[in-house]
Amino acid sequence: MSTAAIPGAPLPVRTPGSRARGRHRRPERPEIPAGSPALLLAVPAAAGPESRSVVEELLSIVRSEQNGVQTVAGYLPADAADGEAGEERTVAELLAEAAEAGLPAPVVVPLVPGPHGFLTDLHDLASAYGATVTDVLGPHPLLAEGVHVRLSEAGLARADRARLFAIATAADGVVLTTAGGQAAADAAGITGMLLAARLAVPVVAAALDVPGSVVDAVAHLKEMGAQNPALAPLVIGPEADSELLATAAEETGCPSAAPLGAYQAVGQLVASTYLAALPAFDGGLAAEEADAEEAAKGSGRHAAQ
Protein backbone atom coordinates (compact mmCIF):
# COMPACT_ATOMS: atom_id res chain seq x y z
CA MET A 1 0.00 0.00 0.00
CA SER A 2 1.34 3.41 -0.87
CA THR A 3 1.66 6.14 1.75
CA ALA A 4 -0.86 8.21 -0.22
CA ALA A 5 -3.58 5.65 0.68
CA ILE A 6 -2.97 5.86 4.46
CA PRO A 7 -5.06 8.53 6.21
CA GLY A 8 -2.93 11.20 7.81
CA ALA A 9 0.21 10.02 6.07
CA PRO A 10 2.47 12.70 4.57
CA LEU A 11 2.41 13.23 0.84
CA PRO A 12 4.82 10.97 -1.03
CA VAL A 13 8.14 12.52 -1.97
CA ARG A 14 9.31 12.09 -5.53
CA THR A 15 12.92 10.97 -5.68
CA PRO A 16 15.10 11.20 -8.77
CA GLY A 17 15.77 7.97 -10.60
CA SER A 18 19.25 6.57 -10.87
CA ARG A 19 21.17 7.23 -14.05
CA ALA A 20 21.14 4.36 -16.52
CA ARG A 21 24.46 2.76 -17.32
CA GLY A 22 26.03 1.66 -20.57
CA ARG A 23 26.49 3.06 -24.06
CA HIS A 24 22.85 3.99 -24.51
CA ARG A 25 22.38 5.87 -21.27
CA ARG A 26 20.90 9.33 -21.52
CA PRO A 27 23.65 11.84 -20.72
CA GLU A 28 23.10 14.15 -17.78
CA ARG A 29 23.09 17.84 -18.58
CA PRO A 30 25.41 19.66 -16.20
CA GLU A 31 24.47 23.08 -14.93
CA ILE A 32 26.45 26.02 -16.24
CA PRO A 33 28.32 27.61 -13.29
CA ALA A 34 27.26 31.13 -12.41
CA GLY A 35 29.51 33.73 -13.99
CA SER A 36 30.53 31.50 -16.89
CA PRO A 37 31.38 33.33 -20.13
CA ALA A 38 28.83 33.54 -22.89
CA LEU A 39 28.97 31.41 -26.02
CA LEU A 40 29.75 33.59 -29.02
CA LEU A 41 29.01 31.74 -32.25
CA ALA A 42 31.35 33.20 -34.88
CA VAL A 43 29.60 33.09 -38.25
CA PRO A 44 31.94 33.21 -41.29
CA ALA A 45 29.58 35.43 -43.27
CA ALA A 46 27.86 38.77 -43.12
CA ALA A 47 24.34 38.70 -41.71
CA GLY A 48 21.73 37.93 -44.35
CA PRO A 49 18.43 36.05 -44.70
CA GLU A 50 20.05 32.65 -45.38
CA SER A 51 22.76 32.78 -42.75
CA ARG A 52 20.44 34.36 -40.18
CA SER A 53 17.85 31.57 -40.35
CA VAL A 54 20.45 28.82 -39.94
CA VAL A 55 22.23 30.59 -37.08
CA GLU A 56 19.05 31.38 -35.14
CA GLU A 57 17.86 27.79 -35.33
CA LEU A 58 21.27 26.46 -34.25
CA LEU A 59 21.33 28.78 -31.24
CA SER A 60 17.86 27.53 -30.34
CA ILE A 61 19.18 23.96 -30.41
CA VAL A 62 22.15 24.95 -28.24
CA ARG A 63 19.87 26.52 -25.63
CA SER A 64 17.64 23.44 -25.59
CA GLU A 65 20.68 21.19 -25.22
CA GLN A 66 22.21 23.17 -22.39
CA ASN A 67 20.05 25.23 -20.08
CA GLY A 68 21.64 28.34 -18.65
CA VAL A 69 24.13 29.03 -21.40
CA GLN A 70 24.11 32.59 -22.73
CA THR A 71 24.33 32.53 -26.51
CA VAL A 72 24.92 35.21 -29.09
CA ALA A 73 25.96 35.19 -32.75
CA GLY A 74 28.63 37.43 -34.22
CA TYR A 75 28.94 37.95 -37.97
CA LEU A 76 31.64 39.22 -40.25
CA PRO A 77 31.39 42.91 -41.16
CA ALA A 78 28.87 43.50 -43.93
CA ASP A 79 29.94 45.22 -47.12
CA ALA A 80 28.94 48.85 -47.21
CA ALA A 81 26.92 48.26 -50.37
CA ASP A 82 24.76 45.37 -49.23
CA GLY A 83 23.19 46.84 -46.09
CA GLU A 84 22.00 43.40 -44.94
CA ALA A 85 23.40 43.46 -41.42
CA GLY A 86 20.27 44.92 -39.75
CA GLU A 87 20.46 44.65 -35.97
CA GLU A 88 22.96 41.77 -36.04
CA ARG A 89 26.36 42.58 -34.59
CA THR A 90 29.83 41.58 -35.63
CA VAL A 91 32.25 39.46 -33.61
CA ALA A 92 34.38 42.54 -32.97
CA GLU A 93 31.42 44.56 -31.66
CA LEU A 94 30.34 41.79 -29.27
CA LEU A 95 33.84 41.28 -27.88
CA ALA A 96 34.19 45.02 -27.36
CA GLU A 97 30.80 45.25 -25.62
CA ALA A 98 31.72 42.43 -23.21
CA ALA A 99 35.02 44.14 -22.37
CA GLU A 100 33.39 47.53 -21.82
CA ALA A 101 30.77 45.98 -19.52
CA GLY A 102 33.44 44.19 -17.48
CA LEU A 103 32.03 40.77 -18.36
CA PRO A 104 34.12 37.62 -18.87
CA ALA A 105 35.43 37.33 -22.42
CA PRO A 106 33.05 35.09 -24.38
CA VAL A 107 34.07 31.64 -25.56
CA VAL A 108 34.18 31.95 -29.35
CA VAL A 109 32.99 28.89 -31.29
CA PRO A 110 33.69 29.09 -35.05
CA LEU A 111 30.71 27.88 -37.09
CA VAL A 112 32.79 25.78 -39.48
CA PRO A 113 33.39 22.01 -39.70
CA GLY A 114 37.07 22.39 -40.60
CA PRO A 115 39.83 24.82 -41.62
CA HIS A 116 38.64 28.10 -43.08
CA GLY A 117 40.24 31.34 -44.18
CA PHE A 118 38.47 33.49 -41.59
CA LEU A 119 40.03 31.63 -38.65
CA THR A 120 43.33 33.55 -38.70
CA ASP A 121 41.63 36.92 -38.35
CA LEU A 122 39.23 35.46 -35.77
CA HIS A 123 42.11 34.26 -33.57
CA ASP A 124 43.86 37.63 -33.86
CA LEU A 125 40.68 39.48 -32.93
CA ALA A 126 39.88 37.22 -29.98
CA SER A 127 43.45 37.47 -28.71
CA ALA A 128 43.16 41.24 -28.53
CA TYR A 129 40.27 40.84 -26.06
CA GLY A 130 41.61 37.82 -24.19
CA ALA A 131 38.85 35.57 -25.54
CA THR A 132 39.19 31.83 -26.15
CA VAL A 133 38.57 30.47 -29.64
CA THR A 134 37.62 26.79 -29.60
CA ASP A 135 38.52 24.16 -32.16
CA VAL A 136 36.39 23.85 -35.27
CA LEU A 137 33.46 21.42 -35.15
CA GLY A 138 35.07 18.62 -37.14
CA PRO A 139 36.06 16.02 -37.88
CA HIS A 140 33.40 14.24 -35.86
CA PRO A 141 31.11 11.20 -36.24
CA LEU A 142 28.06 13.45 -35.88
CA LEU A 143 29.06 15.36 -39.00
CA ALA A 144 29.26 12.11 -40.95
CA GLU A 145 25.80 11.27 -39.62
CA GLY A 146 24.48 14.64 -40.74
CA VAL A 147 25.87 14.26 -44.27
CA HIS A 148 24.37 10.77 -44.45
CA VAL A 149 20.96 12.16 -43.46
CA ARG A 150 21.14 14.89 -46.11
CA LEU A 151 22.07 12.30 -48.76
CA SER A 152 19.13 10.11 -47.75
CA GLU A 153 16.77 13.10 -47.85
CA ALA A 154 17.88 13.71 -51.44
CA GLY A 155 17.27 10.05 -52.32
CA LEU A 156 20.97 9.42 -52.83
CA ALA A 157 21.57 6.95 -49.98
CA ARG A 158 19.70 4.52 -47.76
CA ALA A 159 18.38 6.22 -44.66
CA ASP A 160 18.59 3.08 -42.51
CA ARG A 161 21.51 0.67 -42.73
CA ALA A 162 19.36 -2.08 -41.22
CA ARG A 163 17.09 -2.11 -44.28
CA LEU A 164 18.98 -3.48 -47.23
CA PHE A 165 16.53 -2.38 -49.91
CA ALA A 166 17.88 -0.70 -53.03
CA ILE A 167 17.34 2.88 -54.12
CA ALA A 168 17.43 3.41 -57.89
CA THR A 169 19.10 6.80 -57.52
CA ALA A 170 21.53 5.75 -54.77
CA ALA A 171 25.07 7.00 -55.29
CA ASP A 172 27.85 4.45 -55.72
CA GLY A 173 30.48 7.07 -54.91
CA VAL A 174 30.43 10.36 -53.01
CA VAL A 175 32.43 13.57 -53.27
CA LEU A 176 32.49 15.29 -49.90
CA THR A 177 32.57 18.96 -50.87
CA THR A 178 34.09 21.49 -48.48
CA ALA A 179 34.75 25.22 -48.25
CA GLY A 180 38.06 26.52 -46.96
CA GLY A 181 40.58 25.58 -49.62
CA GLN A 182 42.67 22.47 -49.92
CA ALA A 183 43.32 22.47 -46.17
CA ALA A 184 39.60 21.94 -45.56
CA ALA A 185 39.47 19.12 -48.11
CA ASP A 186 42.47 17.41 -46.49
CA ALA A 187 40.95 17.73 -43.01
CA ALA A 188 37.67 16.24 -44.26
CA GLY A 189 39.39 12.91 -44.84
CA ILE A 190 38.45 11.51 -41.44
CA THR A 191 34.80 12.48 -41.80
CA GLY A 192 34.95 10.97 -45.29
CA MET A 193 36.18 7.66 -43.87
CA LEU A 194 33.33 7.63 -41.36
CA LEU A 195 30.83 8.40 -44.11
CA ALA A 196 32.28 5.66 -46.35
CA ALA A 197 31.83 3.17 -43.51
CA ARG A 198 28.19 4.22 -43.12
CA LEU A 199 27.40 4.06 -46.86
CA ALA A 200 29.76 1.24 -47.94
CA VAL A 201 30.78 3.29 -51.01
CA PRO A 202 34.01 5.18 -51.78
CA VAL A 203 34.15 8.79 -50.55
CA VAL A 204 36.67 11.41 -51.60
CA ALA A 205 36.90 15.03 -50.46
CA ALA A 206 37.21 18.12 -52.65
CA ALA A 207 37.23 21.88 -52.13
CA LEU A 208 34.43 23.93 -53.65
CA ASP A 209 36.64 27.03 -53.65
CA VAL A 210 39.60 25.39 -55.44
CA PRO A 211 39.06 25.46 -59.24
CA GLY A 212 38.83 21.98 -60.73
CA SER A 213 38.93 20.19 -57.37
CA VAL A 214 35.38 18.80 -57.46
CA VAL A 215 35.58 17.90 -61.16
CA ASP A 216 38.83 16.01 -60.57
CA ALA A 217 37.31 14.17 -57.60
CA VAL A 218 34.32 13.03 -59.67
CA ALA A 219 36.66 11.85 -62.43
CA HIS A 220 38.66 9.90 -59.85
CA LEU A 221 35.52 8.14 -58.62
CA LYS A 222 34.54 7.21 -62.17
CA GLU A 223 38.02 5.77 -62.75
CA MET A 224 37.39 3.62 -59.67
CA GLY A 225 34.21 2.29 -61.29
CA ALA A 226 31.53 4.58 -59.86
CA GLN A 227 28.73 5.12 -62.36
CA ASN A 228 26.44 7.30 -60.23
CA PRO A 229 28.59 9.64 -58.13
CA ALA A 230 26.93 12.31 -56.01
CA LEU A 231 28.04 15.44 -54.18
CA ALA A 232 27.63 15.74 -50.41
CA PRO A 233 28.38 19.18 -48.92
CA LEU A 234 30.35 19.06 -45.68
CA VAL A 235 29.35 22.66 -45.10
CA ILE A 236 26.94 24.14 -42.61
CA GLY A 237 25.91 26.91 -44.98
CA PRO A 238 27.17 30.39 -44.12
CA GLU A 239 30.81 29.49 -44.82
CA ALA A 240 30.16 28.52 -48.45
CA ASP A 241 28.84 30.62 -51.31
CA SER A 242 25.62 29.01 -52.55
CA GLU A 243 26.76 29.71 -56.12
CA LEU A 244 29.78 27.45 -55.57
CA LEU A 245 27.48 24.56 -54.67
CA ALA A 246 25.32 25.15 -57.74
CA THR A 247 28.35 25.49 -60.02
CA ALA A 248 29.88 22.25 -58.76
CA ALA A 249 26.69 20.32 -59.52
CA GLU A 250 26.42 21.93 -62.95
CA GLU A 251 30.06 21.32 -63.92
CA THR A 252 30.04 17.68 -62.85
CA GLY A 253 26.49 16.79 -63.83
CA CYS A 254 26.12 15.07 -60.45
CA PRO A 255 23.18 15.36 -58.07
CA SER A 256 23.94 17.04 -54.77
CA ALA A 257 22.57 16.78 -51.26
CA ALA A 258 21.78 19.91 -49.25
CA PRO A 259 24.25 21.51 -46.82
CA LEU A 260 24.08 20.44 -43.18
CA GLY A 261 22.30 23.66 -42.22
CA ALA A 262 20.60 23.67 -38.82
CA TYR A 263 20.89 19.91 -38.37
CA GLN A 264 20.30 18.89 -34.75
CA ALA A 265 23.75 17.33 -34.34
CA VAL A 266 25.47 20.53 -35.45
CA GLY A 267 23.81 22.39 -32.58
CA GLN A 268 24.86 19.60 -30.23
CA LEU A 269 28.45 19.94 -31.42
CA VAL A 270 28.37 23.70 -30.84
CA ALA A 271 27.15 23.13 -27.28
CA SER A 272 29.69 20.41 -26.48
CA THR A 273 32.53 22.42 -28.02
CA TYR A 274 31.64 25.35 -25.77
CA LEU A 275 31.42 23.15 -22.69
CA ALA A 276 34.80 21.60 -23.48
CA ALA A 277 36.35 25.06 -23.16
CA LEU A 278 35.11 25.20 -19.55
CA PRO A 279 37.52 23.11 -17.37
CA ALA A 280 34.74 21.85 -15.07
CA PHE A 281 33.15 19.89 -17.91
CA ASP A 282 36.20 18.25 -19.50
CA GLY A 283 35.74 14.87 -17.83
CA GLY A 284 32.06 14.48 -18.61
CA LEU A 285 32.50 15.54 -22.20
CA ALA A 286 35.34 13.09 -22.70
CA ALA A 287 32.95 10.29 -21.76
CA GLU A 288 30.30 11.58 -24.16
CA GLU A 289 32.85 11.85 -26.97
CA ALA A 290 33.96 8.27 -26.28
CA ASP A 291 30.34 7.11 -26.52
CA ALA A 292 29.88 8.94 -29.84
CA GLU A 293 33.04 7.44 -31.29
CA GLU A 294 32.06 3.94 -30.14
CA ALA A 295 28.63 4.38 -31.72
CA ALA A 296 30.25 5.50 -34.98
CA LYS A 297 32.51 2.43 -34.98
CA GLY A 298 29.48 0.24 -34.45
CA SER A 299 27.71 1.93 -37.36
CA GLY A 300 30.73 1.28 -39.55
CA ARG A 301 30.77 -2.40 -38.63
CA HIS A 302 27.06 -2.74 -39.47
CA ALA A 303 27.54 -0.98 -42.82
CA ALA A 304 30.42 -3.25 -43.77
CA GLN A 305 28.45 -6.41 -43.11
Image: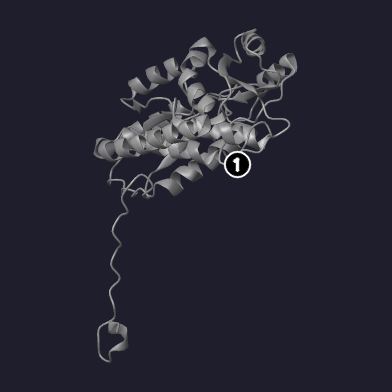
Residue 155 higher or lower than 16, as above or below: above
- Residue that appears at 28% across and 92% down: 7
The percent position of residue 295, horizontal first and vertical second, equals: 42, 37
Dividing the picture into quadrants, the one containing residue 256 is top right
The percent position of residue 286, horizontal first and vertical second, equals: 30, 35
User: How many tags in the picture?
Assistant: 1
- Residue that appears at 30% across and 55% down: 19
Dividing the picture into quadrants, the one containing residue 17 is bottom left
Q: Nearer the viewer, residue 176 or 45?
A: 176
Dividing the picture into quadrants, the one containing residue 296 is top left
The percent position of residue 209, horizontal first and vertical second, equals: 60, 13
Residue 103 higher or lower than 126, as above or below: below
Query: Horizontally, is 59 left or right of 233 in the view?
Result: left
The quarter of the rendered structure image containing the N terminus is bottom left
Judge whether residue 166 can be spotted in this image: yes
Query: Horizontally, is 49 left or right of 305 in the view?
Result: right
Q: Badge 1 is on which residue?
A: 163
The percent position of residue 255, horizontal first and vertical second, equals: 71, 25
Q: Nearer the viewer, residue 277 or 124?
A: 277
* Outermost bottom residue: 7
Judge whether residue 75 can be spotted in this image: no
Label 1 environment density (alpha carbons within 10 Å; few <14, some 14–19, many ≥20): few
What coloring was used for the rendering? one colour
Say which element carries label 1.
Answer: loop
* Outermost front residue: 305
Q: Amino acid at mark 1?
A: Arg
Q: Nearer the viewer, residue 7 or 57?
A: 7
- Residue that appears at 31% across and 84% down: 4
